[in-house]
Image (cartoon, rainbow, N blue to C red):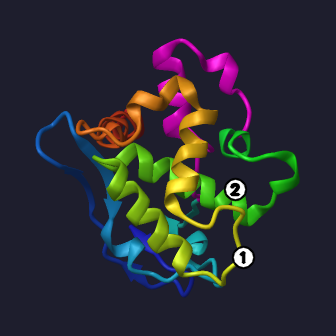
């Protein structure tokens, strides 16, 4: 049984969402828990299952790591890939976050234009000058030129991201 920080029971259902077939998508969604706000409170980390504390696990660079292993180039990407997109003088938490979002958008976008648009929308939510890239086109160019092993897997009609979501959901399932 799931309980929140106040020891109240939480209704929670785990569901795997597939997109077009059992081979695409497959993310795990936790409806009851995801409805809780976690911003600034960490309330989700105070949930218990059968009175035992829980934790959230977030794997750094999971999809790129999976791709690197599939392509046999894992040793080239045994560091934080999002920083690989940046020059040393651009290293900051904000720029890393933008690169992470950009890589994920490129993995999920079915065209360059949709990736540009999604990244532009993300950038527009922040004050001008927050990031070292001013637009999606420049970031996608940097991503494709710094992560060349994956270039053909970005912004393609097969949506590499759906396949990787399916793979990581099977890992979580097992």
Quadrant including the C terminus: top left
In terms of secondary structure, where does tag 1 sit? loop
Quadrant including the N terminus: bottom left
Q: Which of pointers 2 and 1 lies earlier in the amino acid sequence?
A: 2
In front of the other: 37 or 118: 118
Q: Could you tell me which residue is drawn at 76 percent across and 62 percent down?
A: 93
- Label 2 to label 1: alpha-carbon separation: 14 Å
Q: Could you tell me which residue is drawn at 61 percent across and 81 percent down?
A: 126
Q: Quadrant of residue 172?
A: top left
Magenta stretch holds residue 89:
no
Q: Residue placed farthest to the right in the image?
A: 89
Magenta stretch holds residue 72:
yes
Would you name the residue on which mark 1 appears? 129
Between disc 2 and disc 1, the foreground one is 1
Does 101 appear above or below 160? below
In front of the other: 133 or 20: 133
| 164 left or right, relative to 49 | left
Q: Position of residue 4 (x, y in %)?
A: 50, 79
Dots 2, 1 in contact, CB < 8 A: no
Q: Position of residue 152 (x, y in %)?
A: 40, 28
Q: Quadrant of residue 14?
A: bottom left
In front of the other: 8 or 119: 119
Stretch of the chain drawn in magenta: 55-80
Q: Position of residue 122 (x, y in %)?
A: 50, 71
In terms of secondary structure, where does tag 2 sit? helix
Q: Position of residue 107 (x, y in %)?
A: 41, 43
In front of the other: 83 or 119: 119
Q: Could you tell me which residue is drawn at 80 percent across and 60 percent down?
A: 92
- Dot 1: few (<14), some (14–19), or many (≥20) neighbours within 10 Å? few
| 142 left or right, relative to 105 | right
Would you name the residue on which mark 2 appears? 96
Does 3 appear above or below 73? below
């Amino acid at each position: 049984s799931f309980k929140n920080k106040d020891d109240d029971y939480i209704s929670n259902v785990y569901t795997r969402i597939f997109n077009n077939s059992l081979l695409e998508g497959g993310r795990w969604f936790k409806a009851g828990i995801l409805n809780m706000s976690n911003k600034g409170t960490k309330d989700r980390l105070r949930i218990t299952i059968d009175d035992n504390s829980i934790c959230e696990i977030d794997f750094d660079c999971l999809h790129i790591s999976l791709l690197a292993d599939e392509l046999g180039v894992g040793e080239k990407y045994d560091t934080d890939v999002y920083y690989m997109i940046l020059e040393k003088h651009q290293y900051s938490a904000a720029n890393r976050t933008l690169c992470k979002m950009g890589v994920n958008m490129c993995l999920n976008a079915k065209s360059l234009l949709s990736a540009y648009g999604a990244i532009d929308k993300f950038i527009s939510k922040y004050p001008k000058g927050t990031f070292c890239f001013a637009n999606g086109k420049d970031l996608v160019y940097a991503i494709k030129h710094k992560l060349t092993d994956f270039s053909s897997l970005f912004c393609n009609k097969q949506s590499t991201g759906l396949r990787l979501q399916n793979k990581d959901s099977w890992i979580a399932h097992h």
